[in-house]
Amino acid sequence: MSTPAREERLARIRTQRLAQLGTLLAGFAHEVRNPLSTIGLNLQLVLEDFREPETARDKRTQKRLSTVEAEVRRLQKILEEFLGFARAPEPKLVPVPLNDRLRALVDFHEPDLAAAGLQLRFYPGQDIGQVPGDWDHLQGAVTNLLRNAKEATPSGGQVLVSTVRDGDFVLVRVTDTGAGIAAELQPRVFDPYFSTKKTGTGLGLPTVCRVAEEHGGSLTLQSEVGKGTQFTLRLPAGRLSDPESVA
């Protein structure tokens, strides 16, 4: 019969083993990355020789090499996102003028979404002020949500970024008018390596979720098939009475 002390000891051992496994896998991924980069570079060089295939055999070779190169790029993307997920440093929290930073981020991504036929708009809320955060981490999280919205939304659609004060928290919402996520899949979207996209790594949303939790917040979603999806990043707000909390 288990006791609380024994259960606590077993839980501590499991946590240590998971941490060791994470370190081992991160090291493995790092070691694989270098030879994979060499393979990708040499594939590109070989493909240069087949840029203008003259025979049917050359065309078949070019097609097969292109397929291999695409798979190498996919593996490189998976490795980079895994290393980013496994080795992300602890956030360094400082006062962040959230609306100002988000406006600049939206302005930066607006041409990219416009090229895909999408409208990107920012709606800043009142009394947002400064939030305690690590902007490098938060910027990566919002960029990830924007990328998801872009990939989920057909040309002619909209992506909206907004902020709103909610008591002691600030909500950052990224809303799209895309395909939406089926109700039975929604509980799984934050699971590592689960993706509804053919080329997705399944690490984007878990990374955003971790950033939210490391800031003392959370990430949630609302979605309806055929209408779109809204992700809400909930962050602790600065105190309105603090002069540094006013943007």
Image (cartoon, grey):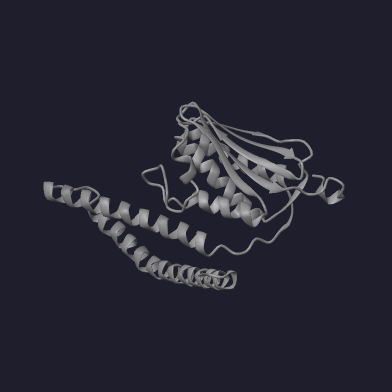
Q: Residue at x 46, y 59 (%)?
A: 82
Q: Residue at x 25, y 58 (%)?
A: 46
Horizontal side of residue 183 vs 49, given as left or right: right
Indicate the position of residue 214 as horizontal and vertical percent values.
63, 57
Indicate the position of residue 38 as horizontal and vertical percent values.
34, 65
Indicate the position of residue 78 as horizontal and vertical percent values.
41, 56
Judge by depth and name the residue closer to the eye, 20 or 158: 20
Q: Residue at x 44, y 38 (%)?
A: 184
Judge by depth and name the residue closer to the eye, 50 or 91: 91
**39 shown above or below 153:** below
- Give the quarter of the image for residue 44: bottom left
**40 shown above or below 221:** below
Horizontal side of residue 126 vs 50, given as left or right: right
Q: Residue furthest left?
A: 56
Indicate the position of residue 234 as horizontal and vertical percent values.
66, 45
Horizontal side of residue 128 vs 62, given as left or right: right
Judge by depth and name the residue closer to the eye, 112 or 130: 130
Query: What is the quadrant of the C terminus in the image?
Result: top right
Q: How many marks?
A: 0
Q: Residue furthest front?
A: 1
